[in-house]
Amino acid sequence: MQRFILFGLLLIALTACSDQSEQNQKTANYSRNVKIDSISLKQIQLPEFETSFIGGFRIYNDAIHFIDKELGKIFQFSDNGELMGVFMGRGDGPYEINTAIDGYLNLKSGDHLFLGSSFDLHLHKKKNYEQLNNYFISWEGEQDVNKVRSSSTPDVNQFALYTLDYQNLLLREGKDGNVYIPIYGETQYFNGLNSDLYYEKGKILARMEIESGKVKEVLGSRSPRYLENQYLPHHASFSYDIDSLNNFYVSHEIDSLIYKYDQDFELISAFGVKGNNMNTNYTAIKDFNLKLFRTLYFEDRPKLGWYYHVEFIDELGLLFRSYTKGEHCDYDGLQILENETLIADLSVPKGFKVKGYIKPYVYGEVISELSEQLKLYKFEVSI
């Protein structure tokens, strides 16, 4: 078992907070109280298995699952990395799936929900992954789709204004039994390149009914920092999680604050501290310049620091946030927050994401298709 000892990076100078916007009328919490200055990160040795290196780990039923999105397969491992079973695969059989998997969610019922590349949904049984239903997301709104998308004064609550964010398809299920899916807009008058409205009032999540696939509501908002920078669309992604009380935690790529909302998406609080040693010299896009956007996204973005994943572990009452510092640093950062207070800021391998908990360990992954990396780690948290 490879053992990777990580030492905490103490501590962080508080950054000057930006002007408060309508989104954040409450006083932000920048508190820190370091309780953890190191963790022992152990790599779990996985057996060789067929994989495309496109996918991610999920923790449920006290077991570890790797969802291979390209192959359409689910690999089940024990908490120590032993391969326990392989399920599904691409095909038309009753225990297969006929598409690549773009989004996946293990539902609270135990069943499995898969999202394909054409708004197609696939519901499978919890134990043997047998097909239960194949259907599509329903975007039925109050107005004509063409009218909504061509309007120079778009209504941000109209479903037709949005599409699924396939670069950021992090599916979560709330306590209310609905599934939440990241969305964004790309119409002429409502997009990330030249629209104030997109950042002022644009929604970021669709609330979908599981049984019907019907989108019931669009929710959320982007960080006020995007308007301050006008607009950084190449950094306009976000991560989120939902706790057992149905509170949402939303972290935007360029914002040191984490926004906590209730189940009606009313803002409860904003809290957080800037990550250590981050290069945040972002380049703004001042007009509708697709060429510059592509250049910045593929060339500039990988060089800079930004926040890329949050995970709330209910059993521990802790929120974990991963961030990249920039190309100048060989490691990424992992923040741990307790009751909205930063209690640790640690060095972790590039691309590290916390993915779940099996007592007494927190589990995390590092996955890269380009370098064919698929690594699973575990560590304990002692407070």
Image (spheres, grey):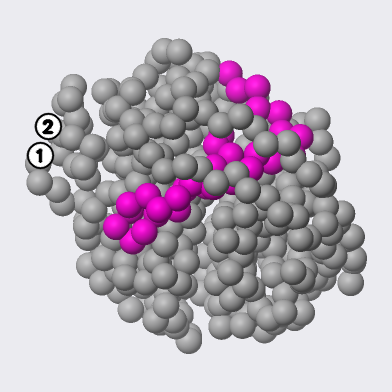
Image: magenta residue range: 254-283
Return the x and y of residue 160 as percentages of the image width and height: 21, 41
Asked which secondary structure carries label 2, the reply is helix
**Residue 371 visible in image:** no
Return the x and y of residue 305 as percentages of the image width and height: 67, 34
Residue 196 highlighted magenta (yes or no):
no
Specify the quadrant that holds the C terminus: bottom right
Quarter location, residue 99: bottom left
* Inter-mark Cα distance, 2 to 1: 5 Å
x 74%, y 65%: residue = 376
Q: How many marks?
A: 2
x 17%, y 25%: residue = 153
Circle 1 residues within 10 Å: few <14, some 14–19, many ≥20: few
Asked if the residue under mark 1 is in contact with the one under mark 2, i.e. CB atoms within 8 Å, the reply is yes
The front one of 52 and 169 is 169
Return the x and y of residue 110 as percentages of the image width and height: 44, 81
x 39%, y 81%: residue = 109
Using the image, determine if residue 50 lies above or below residue 320. below
Residue 132 numbered tag: none
Where is mark 1, residue-wise?
144
Residue 274 highlighted magenta (yes or no):
yes
Using the image, determine if residue 145 lies above or below residue 260. above
Q: Amino acid at mark 1?
A: Asp
Circle 2 residues within 10 Å: few <14, some 14–19, many ≥20: few
Look at the magenta stretch and give its main secondary structure: loop
Where is mark 2, residue-wise?
147
36 lies left or right of 78 = right
Return the x and y of residue 80 as percentages of the image width and height: 76, 79
**Residue 379 visible in image:** yes
Q: Amino acid at mark 2?
A: Lys
310 lies left or right of 203 = right
x 27%, y 49%: residue = 218
